[in-house]
Amino acid sequence: MLKKVALITGGAKRLGKSISLHLARNGFDIALSYNRTSTADVKNLETELKKLGSDVLSVKTDFSVSGDIKKLFDSVSEKFGKLEVLVNNAAMFRQVDLFDITEEIFDGFIDVNLKSVLLCSVEGAKLMKLSADKPCSIINISSLGGIENWTGFIPYSVSKAGVIKLTKLLAKRLAPDILVNSVAPGTVWIDGDDNVNVNKEEEKNYPMRRFGNESDINSMIEYLALKNKWMTGQVLAVDGGKSL
């Protein structure tokens, strides 16, 4: 029996890397995209994934370039011929003050964080239609920034709010063969990472009194990828109660 195939965008570092490894441990063959991750780090990850028994494809992809997105899915089609799970994880994140926002900055966030999710979902859905194992699953990684009002992160928050709305629209359009849901993480602390965008002082603002970890997010990804057969169009805030 052919193994299921999962594609994780931005799947070579931080949360994306963790998701790639977790799905490999759960029996998936893995396709992943990367952009700024070093070639050496990608090769090391490929070795880890193969040790877990996965066939692996990695494709350098700039998600601000639609041609790169098409190339990514053409590569997945050529190698695997199908797709069961798409995790739209690739994104850009940084703080930008309102009066420092330029058209170029705003367009950059929309292109990478929102438009690419639409384009990847369209291409992914075409491949999912070729799978005999349905329903397939699109999992969009949004953010609490798309739910709460982060005034220091307006372009980012607007793009992630768009991902949340897009999730619902895709879910309604692609049912019943493709389930589309979104995971909206709170701050996630990655062991072994520099966590450069994480302010440890904010941990006290979480009702659970800690940031999330890889396991917190991976358990939800695992459910959506392997166990969910009916839920669609939902935004799941895995946030330690921060949005309460």
Image (tube, rainbow, N blue to C red):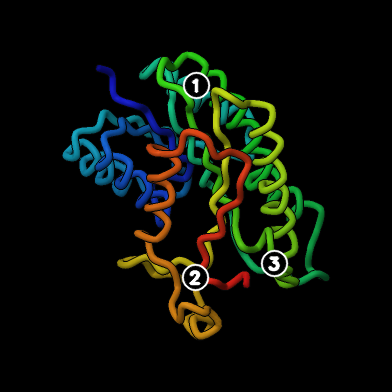
Along the horizontal axis of the image, is 205 left or right of 21? right
What amino acid type is highlighted by mark number 1?
A: Met
Q: What percent of the width, then of the height, locates residue 198?
A: 49, 73
Give the quarter of the figure containing the C terminus.
bottom right
Give the quarter of the figure containing the N terminus.
top left
What amino acid type is highlighted by mark number 3?
A: Glu
Q: Nearer the viewer, residue 80 or 215?
A: 215
Tell me the crowding category of disc 1: few under 14, some 14 to 19, or many 20 or more residues within 10 angstroms, Cα based: many
Who's the residue at 53% across and 82% down the image? Answer: 202
Tell me the crowding category of disc 2: few under 14, some 14 to 19, or many 20 or more residues within 10 angstroms, Cα based: some
Secondary structure beneath disc 2? Answer: loop
Query: Marks 1/3: CA distance?
Result: 33 Å
Who's the residue at 56% across and 54% down the image? Answer: 236
Q: Nearer the viewer, residue 225 or 198?
A: 225
Label 1 or label 2, whichever comes before in sequence order: 1
Query: Marks 1/2: CA distance?
Result: 33 Å
Who's the residue at 79% across and 63% down the image? Answer: 101
Q: What percent of the width, then of the height, locates residue 114?
A: 67, 44
Q: Quadrant of residue 143?
A: bottom right
Q: Nearer the viewer, residue 201 or 133?
A: 133
Residue at mark 1 = 128
Label 3 or label 2, whichever comes before in sequence order: 3
* Numbered circle sitting on residue 148: 3
Along the horizontal axis of the image, is 173 left or right of 18? right
Residue at mark 2 = 240
Secondary structure beneath disc 3? Answer: loop
Q: Nearer the viewer, residue 219 or 92?
A: 219
Along the horizontal axis of the image, is 39 left or right of 148? left
Tell me the crowding category of disc 3: few under 14, some 14 to 19, or many 20 or more residues within 10 angstroms, Cα based: few
Q: Quadrant of residue 232?
A: top right
Q: What percent of the width, then of the height, locates residue 103?
A: 81, 53
Label 1 or label 3, whichever comes before in sequence order: 1
